[in-house]
Image (cartoon, grey):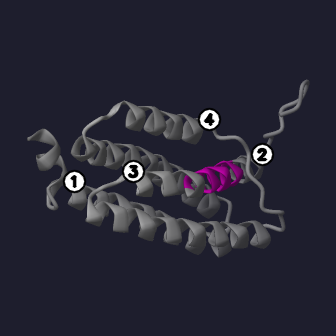
Amino acid sequence: MGLFSKDIKTMDDLLLHGLQDIYYAEQQITKALPKMIEQATNRDLTQGLKTHLEETNKQIERLDQVFKKLGKRPSGTDCPAIDGLIKEADETAGEVEDKTVLDAAIIANAQAVEHYEIARYGTLIAWAEELGHDDIVRFLTTNLNEEKAANTKLNTVALRKGVNRRAAS
């Protein structure tokens, strides 16, 4: 950000800033997921997190394509929101002694991240559509759909696969 001027002057600038935000967020998530995978004890949770790590790497590749289509170099900008969610997840995990409770906490923290990403991608899609950037909407929509599916899988592991039930007993 400029000291005496604002860097976001147009909706296109705002779209680019949002893309840089989610690009940074996805990069940070690829660093945080391996630790969550290592901490998780539930087999379904571990597998789901591993799968989502692979998806996140593909999402970054799609974002690279988005930047390319816009004629911009892929880059991120600090995202205090994702940094805070990851910090909170680390701190919570460090406070949980019981491994079954830790699995429930990992799911909750992962869902907080998913909800952030869902909100961000939804906004970016709306802005891209409004600006006529139909060529990038497909990439962003694919990422959004994967985030929604990851959230649904986390719900399934928490509820139907019994993680919450085991943590509560």
Q: Give the range drawn in magenta.
A: 18-29
Cβ atoms under marks 3 and 2 closer than 8 Å: no
Residue kind at label 2, given as amino acid type: Thr
Disc with the residue nearer the chain's start (1 vs 3): 3
Cβ atoms under marks 1 and 3 closer than 8 Å: no
Disc with the residue nearer the chain's start (1 vs 2): 2
Q: Residue 39 carries which label?
A: 3
Tag 2 residue: 10
| For residue 131, above or below residue 134 | above
Tag 4 residue: 80
The secondary structure that most of the magenta stretch takes on is helix
Disc with the residue nearer the chain's start (4 vs 1): 4
Q: For label 3, count other residues whose C-alpha is less than 10 Å away and answer few (under 14), some (14-19) or many (20+).
A: some
Residue kind at label 3, given as amino acid type: Gln
Q: Quadrant of residue 91?
A: top left
Q: Does the magenta stretch include residue 49?
A: no
Residue kind at label 1, given as amino acid type: Ala
**Tag 2 secondary structure:** loop
